[in-house]
């Protein structure tokens, strides 16, 4: 699924740029990282994190918990993707 999120504020633009830098860095380290899929996951992570922060500021704790759960699932999926890429790059170590 393609995730479309457009940052509007300068700090958000820096946040997304930092995410792009992380994705580029990791994809240079390992040719098996699915770069664009990872980038989309990263964007979704940033958007969910922003949503959770807003929910907390608005004292919408139920929404905050639901978003946190989504953030956790996404982070675990990202970790699985990175782990599988490392295993593919260094199969002799596993």
Image: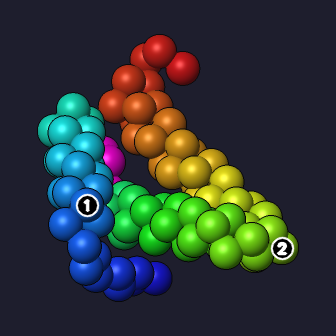
Q: Is residue 35 magenta?
A: yes
Q: Point out the tag, 1 or 2, that comes first from the N-terminus.
A: 1
Residue 81: horizontal and vertical position, in percent?
A: 49, 49
- 10 Å crowding of disc 2: few (<14), some (14-19), many (20+): few
Relative side of 66 to 57, left or right? right
Segment tinted magenta in the rendering? 32-36
Relative side of 70 to 84, left or right? right
Residue at 32% from the left image edge and 48% from the top image edge: 33
Toward which corner of the image does residue 40 lie, by quadrant?
A: bottom left
Residue 62: numbered disc = 2
Residue 24: horizontal and vertical position, in percent?
A: 18, 47
Residue 30: horizontal and vertical position, in percent?
A: 26, 36
Quick check: 25 above or below 69? above
- The answer, for residue 27, to whether it is visible in the render is no
Could you tell me which quadrant the C terminus lies in?
top right
Residue 11: numbered disc = 1
Give the farthest residue toward the top: 93
- The answer, for residue 68, to whether it is visible in the render is yes
Residue at 25% from the left image edge and 79% from the top image edge: 8
Number of numbered labels in the structure image: 2
Residue at 62% from the left image edge and 60% from the top image edge: 71
Residue at 43% from the left image edge and 17% from the top image edge: 92
Front position in the image: 25 or 11: 11
Residue 47: horizontal and vertical position, in percent?
A: 46, 71
Provide the secondary structure element on which disc 1 rests.
helix
């Amino acid at each position: 699924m393609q995730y479309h999120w457009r940052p509007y504020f300068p700090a958000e633009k820096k946040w997304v740029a930092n995410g792009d830098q992380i994705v580029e860095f990791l994809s240079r380290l390992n040719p098996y990282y699915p770069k664009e899929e990872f980038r989309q996951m990263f964007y979704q992570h940033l958007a969910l994190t922003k949503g959770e922060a807003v929910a907390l500021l608005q004292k919408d704790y139920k929404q905050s918990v639901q978003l946190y759960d989504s953030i956790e699932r996404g982070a675990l999926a990202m970790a699985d993707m990175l782990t599988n890429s490392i295993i593919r790059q260094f199969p002799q170590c596993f």
